[in-house]
Image (tube, rainbow, N blue to C red):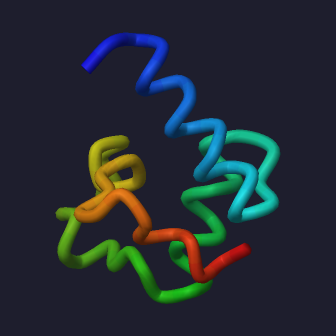
Amino acid sequence: MSDQTVKNRLTGILRKLHATDRTEAVVIAFRRGWLDVAQCGGRVPLQAVLTDPSPNALDSLE
């Protein structure tokens, strides 16, 4: 996966979440119950935020 692909995917995720940056996206994910601190060992890896199991996983947010 190229750097540009990652940037494009991240931009799309932020747009769908109406977030201005990755930090805000993480806050939104916690508030919506998508992330659990206990399962992340007290830390949230960036991979947990960016990993998209399917290409259309966030389409319902539009």
Q: Residue at x 59, y 82 (%)?
A: 60
Residue 42 in sight: no
Q: Is residue 62 left or right of residue 48?
A: right
Q: Is residue 61 above or below residue 9?
A: below
Q: Nearer the viewer, residue 33 or 3?
A: 3
Q: Residue at x 70, y 61 (%)?
A: 16
Q: Residue 12: x, y in percent?
A: 63, 46
Q: Nearer the viewer, residue 25 or 42?
A: 25
Looking at the image, the residue that sits furthest to the bottom is 33
> What number of labels is visible?
0
Q: Quadrant of residue 27?
A: bottom right
Q: Is residue 52 above or below residue 33?
A: above
Q: Residue 18: x, y in percent?
A: 81, 60
Q: Is residue 11 above or below residue 48?
A: above
Q: Residue at x 52, y 69 (%)?
A: 58
Q: Residue 8: x, y in percent?
A: 56, 29
Q: Is residue 52 above or below residue 32?
A: above
Looking at the image, the residue that sits furthest to the top is 3
Q: State which quarter of the image contains the C terminus.
A: bottom right
Q: Is residue 51 left or right of residue 50?
A: left
Q: Is residue 38 left or right of residue 14?
A: left
Q: Quadrant of residue 25?
A: bottom right
Residue 24 in sight: yes
Q: State which quarter of the image contains the N terminus.
A: top left
Q: Is residue 6 left or right of residue 18?
A: left
Q: Nearer the viewer, residue 56 or 31?
A: 56
